[in-house]
């Protein structure tokens, strides 16, 4: 059985897909399953993928009309791995990513989801920069409700995480933020690895450059974050065990944030690299 399933949603990323796949198959880790889910590309995607059909545990599915959430969810359902990782069709894994994250899960059975640091690079300009944003482990609900600082290509999670939650297929962009926010609201803790193991490509014509869609979905998820926070605070009560747990969680989140100077410190208010390099 594959230990780690890498799910690659893609759409018209044929010129980048070989580099992405090579970055996965070049990992120093045995027991990989690779699933490419194509949302109906009209470029060279299928031709590129056909070059990997002889690889063990490689699958290619063409699903016209599938958006990125539907592609990820389909890949999750088809996967066999105990651990699930994601890689967008134009992004790259750096050497050691899979083995480092998998080791963390093997050594800590309580770990549910983990993400690494990232480097963003602009295909057109050649510029590259590390995340230079805030990254936290543990209960990150208070931080995540303000902004998304996790990219799916940096994530690995246990299969059990997806038994109750999947990506919202109605959201065109910011679907990753909504998904991580939902997990954090439920109390799922995140582990952060302070090493750049993923390269995130910024390029023209990608879905993130559609400012109209990005603005609309950012507002939608932002309002959802606000609603989650209000619902969470309503749980606080001195008359039940659940209410006391909510109170302790609230105080812990607020105190930890205050000690870190969140959100007023300058390091928490820098533009994301995707904005700086676009």
Image: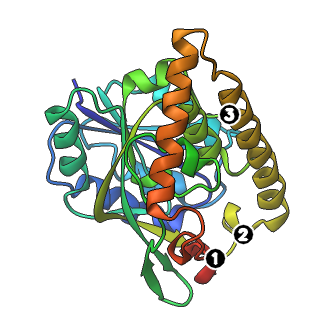
Residue at horizontal 64 percent and vertical 52 percent from the top: 41
Residue 88 visible, this orientation: no
**Can residue 263 be spotted in the picture?**
yes
Give the side of residue 260 with respect to residue 242, left or right: left
Q: Colour scheme in the image?
A: rainbow
Residue beneath disc 1: 275
Q: Secondary structure at mark 1?
A: helix
Earlier sequence position, callout 2 versus callout 3: 3
Residue nearer the viewer, 66 or 76: 76
Question: Around disc 2, counting alpha carbons within 10 Å, would you say few (fewer than 14), some (14 to 19), or many (20 or more)?
Answer: some
What residue is shown with label 3?
A: 168
Tell me if 159 is positioned left or right of 99 in this view: right
| Residue 238 in picture, x, y percent from top left | 60, 16
Q: Which quarter of the rendering shows the C terminus?
A: bottom right
Secondary structure at numbered mark 3: loop
Name which quarter of the figure residue 207 lies in: bottom right
Report the residue marked by disc 2: 209
Neighbourhood count class around disc 3 (C-alpha, 10 Å): few under 14, some 14–19, many 20 upward? some
Residue 169 occupies which quadrant of the picture?
top right
Dot placed on the residue nearer the N-terminal end, 2 or 1: 2
């Amino acid at each position: 059985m594959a230990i780690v399933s890498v799910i690659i949603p893609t759409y018209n990323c044929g010129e980048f897909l070989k580099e992405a796949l090579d970055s996965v198959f070049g990992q120093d880790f045995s027991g990989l399953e690779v699933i490419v889910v194509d949302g109906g590309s009209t470029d060279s995607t299928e031709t590129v993928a056909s070059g990997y059909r002889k690889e063990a545990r490689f699958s290619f599915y063409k699903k016209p009309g599938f958006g990125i959430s539907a592609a990820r969810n389909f890949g999750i359902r088809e996967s066999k791995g105990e651990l699930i990782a994601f890689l967008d069709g134009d992004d790259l894994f750096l050497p050691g990513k899979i083995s480092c994250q998998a080791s963390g899960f093997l050594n800590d059975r309580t770990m549910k989801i983990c993400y690494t640091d990232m480097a963003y690079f602009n295909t057109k300009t050649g510029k590259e920069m590390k995340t230079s944003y805030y990254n936290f482990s543990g209960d990150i609900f208070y931080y995540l409700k303000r902004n998304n600082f996790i990219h799916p290509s940096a994530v690995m999670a246990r299969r059990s995480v997806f038994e109750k939650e999947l990506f919202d297929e109605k959201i065109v962009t910011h679907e990753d933020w909504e998904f991580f926010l939902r997990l954090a609201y439920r109390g799922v803790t995140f582990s952060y690895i302070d090493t750049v193991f993923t390269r995130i490509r910024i390029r023209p014509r990608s879905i993130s450059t559609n400012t109209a869609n990005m603005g609309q979905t950012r507002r939608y998820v932002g309002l959802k974050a606000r609603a989650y926070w209000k619902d969470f605070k309503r749980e606080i009560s001195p008359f039940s065990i659940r209410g006391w747990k909510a109170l302790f969680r609230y105080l812990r989140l607020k105190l930890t944030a205050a000690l870190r100077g969140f959100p007023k410190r300058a390091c928490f208010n820098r533009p994301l690299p995707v904005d700086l390099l676009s």
